[in-house]
């Protein structure tokens, strides 16, 4: 880690100049919306591929299973299990695409965050600052592993829902048409696959936001920036527990406190019903951490 003050001194910046820098407010950091939308589309396409597999493996066999059940043929359950297993095997093969997709998205978010970080810091200190913390690779790997786990869980959840809907439909005397409608959806009911697709979209958005927030934290700490100003997306989607932190000074090493007087005193976030944690950490959070230079630059010039 290179302390930002040490870096500026090495470049021959005077104390007066550095003190003036500390009063500048960094520009708003952009959120990776385009990347988020790309990742959402990947997740949704994955669910659509599972739907195609369902149509090829289970949907065509439902009439036979229904006939066996109503005719009290004992093999209906084992036959259902067999075709669900075929679906699972093919769905798992399709799911393998998440590994390269997650790796690519992790790299894209990291590059986006790096450029935004460069732009933000350069606006304050006047020069670009290289930041490639060693911890970065670890977080990129964790992102990939988490997404593999999330997609696997989503696939297993879909498999369980298919089993539940078919067996429940048979037991309650539903027709094949009614069972299919429950799975594929109607104008009135969203259907199992559509609900899974909605969940997939939420997961994709959440994952991009979380990674972007983690990258910001790592890069700021790498330059010795230990405090930040909480900034929200400033729209109607912002949670109340996040909105109360707008403009508040926070610390990277303690997500349970905040300051409204430039760090002279610190209060518990619980006292104002504020979120305890970091920007981007909460589910689908679009808040960001504005780097706080004042304490670093002013203290070192005294």
Image (spheres, grey):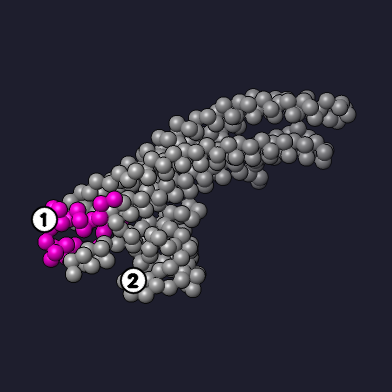
Q: Quadrant location of residue 194?
A: top right
The residue identified by callout 2 is 263
Residue at 48% x, 48% y is 206
Q: Quadrant location of residue 55?
A: top right
For residue 289, say whether it is visible: yes
Is the residue 56 above or below the residue 242 in the image?
A: above
Which quadrant holds the C terminus?
Answer: bottom left
Question: For the residues carrying marks 1 and 2, which lies nearer the camera in this image?
Answer: 1
The residue identified by callout 1 is 12
Residue at 45% x, 33% y is 101
Q: Along the horizontal axis of the image, is 214 left or right of 131? A: right
N-terminal of the pair, mark 1 or mark 2, is: 1
Q: Quadrant location of residue 291?
A: bottom left
Range of magenta residues: 1-28
Q: Along the horizontal axis of the image, is 66 left or right of 9? A: right
The crowding category of the residue bearing disc 1, from other C-alpha atoms within 10 Å (few below 14, some 14 to 19, many at least 20), is few
Is the residue 267 above or below the residue 234 in the image?
A: below
Q: Is residue 25 magenta?
A: yes
Query: 249 or 171, which lies in front?
Result: 249
């Amino acid at each position: 880690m290179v302390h930002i003050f040490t870096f500026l001194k090495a470049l021959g910046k005077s104390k007066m100049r550095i003190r003036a820098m500390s009063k500048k407010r960094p520009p708003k950091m952009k959120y990776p919306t385009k990347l988020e939308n790309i990742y959402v589309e990947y997740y949704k396409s994955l669910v659509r591929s599972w739907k195609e597999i369902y149509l090829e493996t289970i949907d065509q066999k439902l009439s036979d299973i229904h006939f066996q059940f109503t005719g009290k043929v004992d093999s209906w359950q084992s036959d259902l299990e067999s075709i669900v297993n075929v679906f699972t095997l093919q769905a798992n093969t399709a799911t393998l695409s998440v590994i390269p997709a997650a790796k690519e998205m992790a790299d894209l978010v990291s590059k986006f965050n790096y450029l935004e970080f460069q732009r933000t810091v350069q606006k304050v200190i006047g020069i670009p600052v290289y930041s490639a913390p060693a911890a970065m690779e670890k977080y990129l790997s964790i992102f990939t592993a988490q997404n593999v786990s999330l997609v696997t869980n989503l696939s297993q959840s879909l498999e369980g829902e298919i089993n539940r809907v078919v067996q429940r439909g048979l037991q309650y005397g539903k027709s094949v048409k009614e069972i299919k409608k429950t799975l594929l959806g109607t104008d009135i009911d969203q259907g199992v696959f559509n609900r899974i697709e909605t969940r997939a979209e939420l997961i994709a958005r959440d994952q991009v936001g979380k990674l972007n927030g983690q990258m910001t934290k790592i890069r700021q700490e790498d330059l010795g920036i230990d405090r930040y100003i909480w900034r929200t997306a400033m729209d109607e989607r912002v949670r109340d527990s996040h909105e109360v932190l707008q403009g508040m000074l926070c610390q990277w090493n303690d997500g349970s406190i905040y300051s409204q007087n430039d760090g002279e005193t610190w209060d518990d976030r619980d006292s104002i019903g504020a979120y305890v944690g970091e920007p981007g950490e909460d589910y689908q959070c679009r808040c960001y951490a504005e780097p706080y230079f004042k304490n670093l630059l002013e203290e070192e010039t005294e």
